[in-house]
Amino acid sequence: MHTRKRKSCSTKHSLLAVLACLVFLCACQPEYEARPTRIPTSASTPTQTQTFTLVPTITPRASLTPTITLTLYPSLTPTRTATPIATRPAKLFDFQDSYGNVVDWGYFYVTDIGFDTDAEVNQLSAMLSFRLMDRAIHQRNMRILGQDITVYYLHVSHDFKGEQIAMELVIGGTYGKDVLINLIPADGSAYLRVRSMTADEPFDPYVIHRDANLPFAQQQEQYPDMMLTDFQTLLRSLPDELFILADHPILFPRNDWQQIKVDMTRISSLAARYWSFFSRDVYDHITGPSDFALALAQYLLSGHSMPKGTYSFASQTLILISP
C-alpha cells in the first residue's frame, strides 16, 4: 500500500512540472497586436501626401503662360505696325545749274535724246528736280511679270507748270512681299547710286548723266553705290533746304524692249524702276511707252500740260544738293 502511494505522488509531480513548463512557454510568446513594425509601414501614406503638394506648383505654370504671350505681342507691334511718318517738306534756296538755269521744284534738263529713222523721238532721258515731303523710305507691294516685288520709293512732288503734283520717286525693289530694307538680300537690289553735293560745287546735269553711265569702275569714283539702309539714315540728317534730282530714261528704243523685259525678269530693282514707263498686254508683253511716259515726254519736249494722276518717276542716279 505504501509503495503505490509513492508512485501516484511522483506521477502527480511529473504532471505538475509539465504544466508549469507549458505555462512558462505560453507566457514567453510575443503579443502580435502590439507589434511596432506595422506602424512604420503605414507611415508610407505621408509620403503619398507629399506628392499632392506638387499641385500648387502646377497652378503658377498655368498663370505664367498668358503672361509670356502677352508680353511678346507688344514687342512685335513696332515691326508689324507702320510707324507714323512726320511730314517735313524741303525748302527752296537760291541755286543755279552750270548753264545759269534756276533750280526749283519745276526744274528739269533733258540729258539724252535719240531719234528713229522717221525722225521720231524714240529715246529720252531727263533729270528732274523734286521736293522731298518727308524723311523716310516708303514701300509697297507690286506684281511685276508674274513675281511679287517690294518697291521702295520716296514721297516727293514736282511742279508741273505751276501745279505741284505728288509723285513716287522709285529708288529700288526686291523680290517678295513686305520686305523691310534691312532684310533685302546682299545683292544689287540693296543699293542705289547717289551723290551728295553743296551749292558751292558746279552742277552740270549733262556731265552727271555722262559720268554716271561710264563703266562701273569709273563711275564708282564719283557716284558710289549706297545701301538703302545707309541712305535712310542719311535722309534724316539732311537739312531742310534741299534739292533732290533724279536722272532716268523715259523713252526706250523699240529694239531694246525685249532685252529690257529679260532684265526686268532677272533684276528686281530694274523691274521696280522701269515698270511705270511701259504699257503691256494681258500676257505682259511690252507694247510701247506707258501713258505716263508719253505725257511726260510731251511735257518735257513740247511744254504740254501734265494730266492729273498718280505718277512714279524713278532714279538711276540720285543727286542731293544742300546749301
Image (cartoon, rainbow, N blue to C red):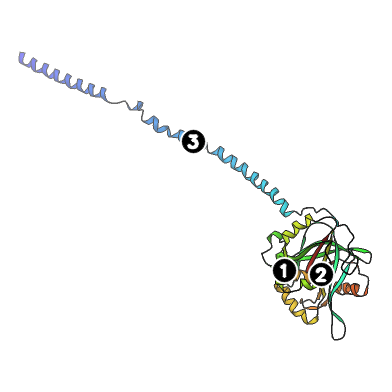
The quadrant of the rendering that contains the N terminus is top left
Q: Nearer the viewer, residue 17 or 180?
A: 180
Residues at marks 2 and 1, CA–CA distance in whole angstroms: 16 Å
Which residue does the numbered mark 1 point to in the structure image?
A: 220
Residue 300 bears which disc, if any? none
**Of label 2 and label 1, which has the lower sequence position?**
1
Residues at marks 3 and 2, CA–CA distance in whole angstroms: 80 Å
Q: Nearer the viewer, residue 28 or 98?
A: 98
Which residue does the numbered mark 2 point to in the structure image?
A: 247
State the image quarter where residue 166 is shown.
Answer: bottom right
Tag 1's secondary structure?
A: helix
Tag 3's secondary structure?
A: helix
- Up/down of 70 relative to 113, above or below: above
Could you say where residue 304 lies in the image, as x and y percent from the top left? Answer: 93, 72
Q: Is disc 2 surrounded by few (<14), some (14 to 19) or many (20+) residues within 10 Å?
A: many
Tell me the kind of residue under disc 3: Gln
Left or right, 77 with respect to 85, comes to: left
Residues at marks 3 and 1, CA–CA distance in whole angstroms: 76 Å
Tag 2's secondary structure?
A: strand
Q: Is disc 3 surrounded by few (<14), some (14 to 19) or many (20+) residues within 10 Å?
A: few
Residue 50 bears which disc, if any? 3
Could you say where residue 25 lies in the image, as x and y percent from the top left? Answer: 23, 24
Number of dots carrying numbers: 3
Tell me the kind of residue under disc 1: Gln
State the image quarter where residue 127 is shown.
Answer: bottom right
The quadrant of the rendering that contains the C terminus is bottom right
**Of label 3 and label 2, which has the lower sequence position?**
3
Asked whether the beta carbons under mark 3 and mark 1 sit within 8 Å of each other, the answer is: no
